[in-house]
């Protein structure tokens, strides 16, 4: 028997010129990119003394980014442009889809990238080759996501979620319907559930095996960030003065009160991110604080960053779970080292 001890140490911090919109690790976990709303890209090596490279793409809209293959990144820019960015800071135009604003990119270790382009989804491979395009959804696609095995693509939009088979983009789509505007989509690691944050201050979820849907409400503010625990038993969301964790063990959250994670104060939770291999959630607040909270039977909290800073806008675990990237709305980009130890007793 033993008790888990968790420690967090802020190891480095940088100041960029604009809002950090995303933090992305490459699949190998060797490099990290912070991307801002004005086209800055800070690339870090993740050794004890991180190497840094600062790039700037001509951009007048918020950029989105994702891993591309084992080492690289894919980053959007103005006028439907997609760029490959290497850890050495080399930038190559990967694909151009004129006349659209790209708001969502999804990728994985399966060699494909799904891109939200207006009311459709475009599928390309890691080299930028166009594979196909879906038919138009009833409204603009707000977010795309792959299932864990890469065989299905989930698209959130007004009226619910559409699920596409990667190899059948023109047919065999499946609709998960619920009225309202669905802003994000997140699929559990075990592929049993899909969930969305909605414009109506709610979270909606579907049990994929039987299309059964569930509605979760009671939020102070619009939930904009959500993350599944590694075992698929918890869905952690923002939108309150603590992170809200809904239990999906057994038949799901219906009839169960949610669990609240993290300290409760005057500031709302802005971003959440679950650890890739442990039952731990990172929680970022509007007042700049970042806290780690346990999703296990034994509850505990570990501070990473104290309050008093700008709102946390991005949180991302490294693939190994040993480091946490933190972005803020004032351009602060930080890296924390996370150590877990089991103490016997």
Image (cartoon, rainbow, N blue to C red):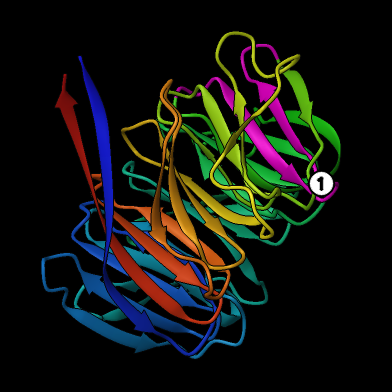
- The answer to whether any part of residue 128 appears in the image is no
Q: Position of residue 41 (x, y in %)?
A: 38, 80
Residue that sits furthest to the front in the current view: 345
Q: Judge by depth and name the residue closer to the eye, 130 or 49.
A: 49
Q: Judge by depth and name the residue closer to the eye, 214 or 128.
A: 214
Residue that sits furthest to the left in the current view: 48
- The answer to whether any part of residue 310 appears in the image is yes
- Residue in the image at 82% along x and 51% along y: 199
Q: Quadrant of residue 59?
A: bottom right
Question: Where is the C terminus found, in terms of image quarters?
Answer: top left
Tell me if residue 268 comes above or below residue 37 in the rendering. Answer: above
Crowd class of label 1 (few under 14; some 14 to 19; many from 20; radius 10 Å): some
Residue receiving disc 1: 201
Residue that sits furthest to the right in the current view: 179
- Residue in the image at 37% along x and 45% along y: 108
Q: Position of residue 217 (x, y in %)?
A: 81, 35
Question: Where is the N terminus found, in terms of image quarters?
Answer: top left
- Assess whether residue 57 is covered by the magenta stretch: no
Q: Judge by depth and name the residue closer to the eye, 18 or 218.
A: 218
Q: Over which residues does the magenta segment extend?
A: 190-210
Q: Position of residue 322 (x, y in %)?
A: 23, 49
């Amino acid at each position: 028997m033993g008790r888990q001890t968790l420690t967090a140490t802020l190891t480095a911090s940088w100041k960029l010129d604009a809002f950090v919109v995303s933090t992305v690790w490459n699949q190998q976990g060797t490099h990290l990119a912070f991307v801002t709303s004005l086209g800055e890209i800070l690339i870090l090596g993740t050794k004890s003394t991180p190497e840094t490279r600062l790039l700037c793409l001509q951009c007048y809209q918020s950029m989105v980014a994702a891993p591309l293959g084992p080492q690289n990144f894919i980053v959007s820019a103005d006028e439907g442009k997609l760029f490959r960015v290497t850890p050495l800071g080399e930038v190559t135009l990967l694909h151009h889809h004129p006349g659209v604003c790209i708001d969502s990119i999804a990728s994985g270790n399966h060699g494909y990238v799904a891109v939200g382009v207006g009311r459709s989804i475009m599928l390309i491979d890691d080299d930028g080759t166009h594979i196909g395009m879906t038919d138009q959804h009833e409204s603009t696609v707000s977010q795309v996501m792959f299932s864990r095995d890469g065989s299905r693509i989930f698209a959130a939009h007004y009226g619910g979620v559409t699920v596409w088979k990667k190899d059948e983009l023109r047919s065999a789509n499946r609709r998960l319907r619920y009225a309202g505007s669905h802003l994000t989509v997140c699929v559990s690691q075990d592929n049993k559930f899909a969930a969305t944050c909605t414009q109506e201050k709610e979270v909606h979820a579907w049990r994929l095996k039987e299309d059964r849907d569930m509605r979760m409400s009671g939020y102070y503010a619009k939930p904009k960030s959500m993350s599944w625990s590694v075992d698929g038993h918890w869905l952690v969301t923002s939108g309150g003065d603590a992170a809200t964790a809904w239990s999906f063990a057994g038949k799901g959250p219906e009839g169960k009160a949610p669990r609240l994670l993290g300290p409760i104060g005057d500031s709302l939770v802005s971003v959440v991110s679950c650890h890739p291999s442990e039952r731990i959630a990172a929680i970022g607040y509007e007042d700049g604080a970042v806290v780690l909270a346990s999703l296990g039977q034994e509850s505990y909290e570990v501070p990473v960053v104290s309050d008093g800073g700008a709102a946390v806008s991005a949180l991302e675990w490294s693939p190994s779970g040993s480091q946490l990237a933190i972005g803020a709305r004032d351009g602060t980009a930080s890296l924390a080292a996370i150590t877990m130890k089991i103490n016997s007793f």
